[in-house]
Image (tube, coloured by chain):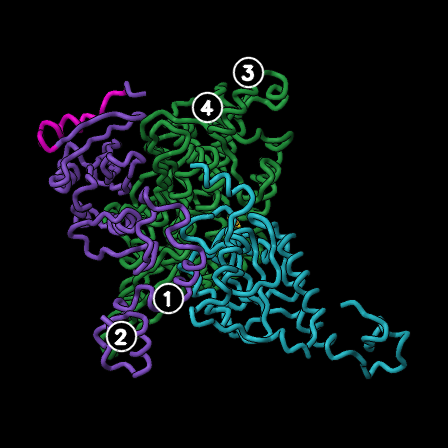
Amino acid sequence: MNGASPNPSAAALQARFGGAIVGASVSCGDTIVVVARERAHEILRWLKETPGEAYDYLVDVTAVEYRDRERPLEVVYQLWSLPRRVFLRLKVELPKQEPLAVDSVVDLWRGADWLEREVYDMFGIAFRGHPDLRRILMWDGYAEGHPLRKDFPLRGRFSRAEQVRQALTKTPEAHHSVEELAVAEAFQQLSNDARQKLERAGGPGGA
Amino acid sequence: MDVKPGAVAAGGDAAAGLISSPNWITSRLDDLVNWSRANSLWPMPFFPACCAIEFMATAASRYDISRFGMERLGYTPRQADVLICAGRVPFKLAPMLRRIWDQMPQPKWCISVGACASSGGIFDTYAMVQGIDAIIPVDVYIPGCPPRPEGILYGIMLLQKKIKGESILDPTLRVEQLPDERGMFLRPAAVDELSEPFGNSVHQTRSA
Amino acid sequence: MGEKRTLELELATPGVDAEGRPIRVPLGVAEGRRAAAPDLRSELMLINIGPQHPATHGVLRLVVELDGEVVSRVIPHIGYLHSGFEKLGEYRHYNQIIPLTDRTDYLAAPSNNVALALAAEKLMGITITPRCTVLRVIACEMSRIMSHLVWAGTTAIDLGAFTVFLWAWQPREGIYDLLEEWCGARLTTSLTRVGGMMADVPEGWTARLRTWLQGLPKTLDEVDTMLARNGIWLGRTQDIGVVSAEEAVNRSLSGPMLRASGVAYDVRKDRPYLGYETYDFEVPIGEHGDVYDRYLVRMEEMRQSVKILHQALDRLPEGPVNAEDPRVILPPKHRAMSDMEAMIYHFKQVMEGVSAPVGEAYMAVESPKGELGNYFVSDGTAKPVRWRIRPPSFINLQALPFMAQGHLLSDLIAINASVDIVMGEIDR
Ligand code: SF4
């Protein structure tokens, strides 16, 4: 299984970036290249824009946390080259002692936008330079943490009653869209009771 | 409508033997009201997930829900009598479900379609309400994942049966449930108890 | 098709070209309205659509900023159906995950089952039998048809035509019957197992599938008759929600969304699995990247699926459906009851699950919505460390704000419908 020959891009990366390549391996036929966090963005740009590589299609961005608590978290980029029909997996390791952050690739692929937001929501990994890094699946102000982390229990941290209470006492408007509804700018022109409602909901008036 | 001798007598074949003139009708008001309510239910579909697809099948060509006077799927809670919750309800969706229920005028009923809406189903996780009865009162639970269209139709018939047994004079039936000071509709202990896992899910999710 | 219908058609149709494809009516209308809008500009209006709204295909919520009737900004909000699939998967054996996949893209459960089984097999290095391979192709193509049928029906409802929904649901009920016969369930099929299928197809099933296949093209033609040259449909779909090829690639779109923009990327052709390279079929490509092309692509994909299904039925070999691998495949019941060794295998599989070697595998299939990937990371135990679904409609929906900008509010509904979203898959 691990006998498959690695994707030549791994060697090309090694030659071009040397010290920034932490390791390369093959698992189930797919080549995995682990790169240094600080240069990940540069490397991804190179992979996308170099004609001989041409990884122009970002398949997925996700993250992995291992059951072994010592192991670092990994951010995983799955890349595909449409013209060359080659698959490559790039990984960035994020040790748990350091702040969990990596450069965003939204400037390279617009498609990374929600994918990175999801990783942020589920793992708490920040993407530097992301235009709009908010929770996406859970709501803003979700108090229990980042669900896909291994220290997060399957049923959540709170009792079911508390979860129901928190869910019900959130007014639907308060969930996230108050700023986007552009009410922030128009706040002063709102009617009194609308303003009070927003304040109660922790909207822009409260902040 | 089953015609009970003495209770309902209407002009026409069914009651031909009981009355002499087709121009009048005697009935208990309850029966008349319930009969009309039960046979012209206007559903408010609340369709988050997979069970909704089976509900769509129920509404489509083969199973044809209009036979039960229910084909008017309203999509506006203000003109509906029965909330049909078909699918899983995560916590993020819970306030919307409650709000829709609050917007529906009395008399109103609720059918919970499928394992998820009734109990959380296989999703005993951080994100899911373990049965919508923690949020709104439910009249009929339809089991299945998803229930077959026949099951859904049976649930609708059960609700019709339940409605026919109601009395318009019963003051407790149409009381709006108000939130307590914590913003909940049930005691926390009751919610915890309703949300306890049961059956297989205990084994499958606790063994890791 | 009857004579009468053709006659009506001619009245409504702008005409067809030599290959029988409808000629596009030039639509200056949308342009004109867009240009006229600034005169009326006074104040932007904000409206909220969803999460409980019939045209959002589930519990999607759209916050729309309107300039008159022109959309200036759309912000989709998702997560209203987030059920914790990926977390739940980390607590389950590989085979126990299969029922979860039914419930992600619930319009096309069999192809999700196949995708998951393929990923687990890639991780464990299992080779499946020839019969199983062909049966899986059949399952995948059936789910493509059933998903696209619902898509056509619900999209037509969104644009004001109810009949297509009823017509499209008829063959779908036929698929339900076939699936029910095969695995006992209509919707949540759990058709595959790691290393095989949950069951072989019953006696006479293939003949019934053939009969059903014969009826399908007629339905597709009927739907085309209703829509493909219908003046209203053309007006509401052509030049609406255009995405260029570069944009589509940059936004990681996949499936019919990508192909309608003219990018010929189909996992079945580019990274073949299940022997798709040996089937004779075409991948339809659009040229305008608008809602209408997505419609044409999906309709043509159904016809191609019919073609693949016929080929698969022709070549369906005899033989076992499950791999000869006692690690992953349960021994037959009678042996588990009488043979010590078989009983031990049975016991180990049921109690401990099948452990996968340390490693990771990403396996993509072409689901009806696009590239559906399953990514497993294993630490050598029977439960994955990470199970990730690459959800095609999640990524496709991302492009909605981009596509809808500058269109009318009613076009937003058409564009949203054209993405073919399933909230179960988007929110997981
Ligand atoms: S009960 Fe089953 S089919 Fe229904 S919503 Fe839940 S998972 Fe889906």
Amino acid type assigned to the residue bearing label 1 in the image: Lys
Which residue was labeled with disc 2? C44
Which residue was labeled with disc 4? C128
What chain is tagged by disc 4? Answer: C
Instruction: Tell which of A128 and A30 is nearer to you.
Output: A128
In what element is the residue under mark 3?
helix
Which residue was labeled with disc 1? A170
Q: CA distance from mark 3 to mark 1?
A: 57 Å
Amino acid type assigned to the residue bearing label 4 in the image: Ile
Which residue was labeled with disc 3? C341
The picture's colour for chain C is: green
**Residue labelled 3 has its Cβ within 8 Å of some atom of ligand 1:** no
In what element is the residue under mark 2?
loop
Can residue C28 be seen in the rendering of this structure?
A: no
Can residue A54 be seen in the rendering of this structure?
A: yes
Q: CA distance from mark 4 to mark 3?
A: 23 Å
The picture's colour for chain A is: purple
Give the residues drawn in magenta, as a range: A4-20
What chain is tagged by disc 2? Answer: C
Amino acid type assigned to the residue bearing label 3 in the image: Glu
The picture's colour for chain B is: cyan
Residue B108 location (% of width, % of height)? 58, 71
